[in-house]
Image (spheres, rainbow, N blue to C red):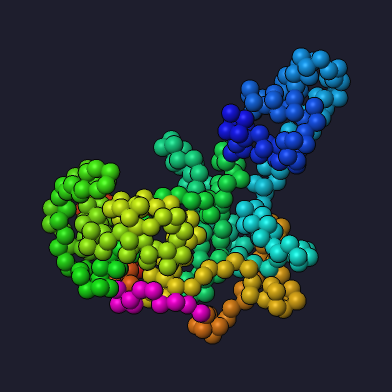
Amino acid sequence: YLNLVGFRGEVVGISALSARLFHKYPSGLDAEEAAIAAALIRSPNAPAARVADRACSVLQEQGLKPDCKTLATYTAQVLASKRNERLNADDQLAPHLGQRLLAAWPAATPRPSSIATTLDARLQRFARDTLRQHLRELRDRHVEDGAVIVLDNATGEVLAWIGSSGELSQAADVDGVMALRQAGSTLKPFLYEIAIEQRWLTAASILDDSPVGLSTSSGLYIPQNYDHQFKGPVSLRTALGSSLNVPAVRTLVMVTPERFAQRLTALGMPLKHNGDFYGYSLALGSAEVTLASLSNAYRALANGGLHSPWRVQAANQHTAGHQQRTSTDPRTVTPARAASASEAATLPGTALMNPAATYIVADILADREARVPTFGLSNALAARYWAAVKTG
């Protein structure tokens, strides 16, 4: 129970609490610290004074003679310091990325006073503020948090990294950019790309959007569309543009789950199992991926099937003596763009998808009419300029 009990925010288990509040393992807690931890189990968000009273009672029941006044002061200091850390995090622009870069710095290398990144401070602020505004508008629909990553398609540079909504989140320390979440319908473009690439289907091929039951090792798999309705015979263009589920599953039967899983893994998505484990539900995004890996796979679609890693540290971080730096204090983050246009054209990459097939997929994702059966004529996906868009 102590390993699973929830504490403040997203802290789970006594080990996490010990590390967060006291910066030590549970085995290293003294009697007063252990009493505070025990008092927090009953009500993790109780005021410091109440936590101190309970901790004092715990010590007294153990036959100890605590100085309850001193304990109250210490408890207030411990809990207040954590609240101040959260408030300071809300003032920062990229706290999740800053922590990740510092944690990943080689242990044998002296930690620098600053780390040069590719972030664009202006875009970072815009993305953060836009996310928070959007979440406030969705509060009545029980949407609690979100994350944003912005990648430069040509270079792979990370221009914005918003791990959470900060003050609006109940788990603000969780980095949504790198957290594993089911991909949902965002995997469908890669599935159809394979079918088009192999010339099994074209954008005009007719797929059957009607009830289907597929036999699996665990029973009958019966996929449903989002609106629980069926459109009958539809083109691949309409099936992808309107994000219909049944045609996608029928396409996966043709492609096979294992072939699809291998392609997703090659694109950098961290699938933990092979395709047969996910089965036909893989067409509907049952696999867990990170927002960063998924976004980078979409870069490959934009680049004609050429896949290359994303990067967030400036190219000269280790080679140019730190001459071009961006402070890790995200309130002062400024761009440190290291790759010029000529350099971007020669960045290494791996051709994983057919250029013609990726062009067709992107054209479908930008086709407003193809979205009509599911999203209608007027919807939030329509941009004033050419934009390939996918929901999920």
Q: Nearer the viewer, residue 245 or 108?
A: 108
Q: Nearer the viewer, residue 304 or 387?
A: 304
Left or right: where 22 falls relative to 336: right
Residue 15 point in image, percent of width and height:
67, 38
Segment tinted magenta in the rendering: 348-357
Residue farthest toward the left in the current orientation of the protein: 233
Left or right: where 129 falls relative to 362: right
The answer to whether residue 302 is seen in the rendering is: no
Residue at image location 46% in from the left, 65% down from the top: 268
The answer to whether residue 115 is seen in the rendering is: yes
Left or right: where 89 falls relative to 158: right
Q: Nearer the viewer, residue 122 or 337?
A: 337
Residue 201 point in image, percent of width and height:
20, 69
Is 349 colored magenta in this rendering? yes
Image height of 13 relative to 58, above or below? below
User: Which of the 4 image quarters holds residue 37?
Assistant: top right
Image height of 369 relative to 209, above or below? below
Is 275 colored magenta in this rendering? no
Left or right: where 287 falls relative to 364: right
Residue 93 point in image, percent of width and height:
64, 54
User: Which of the 4 image quarters holds residue 206?
Assistant: bottom left
Residue farthest toward the front in the current orientation of the protein: 217
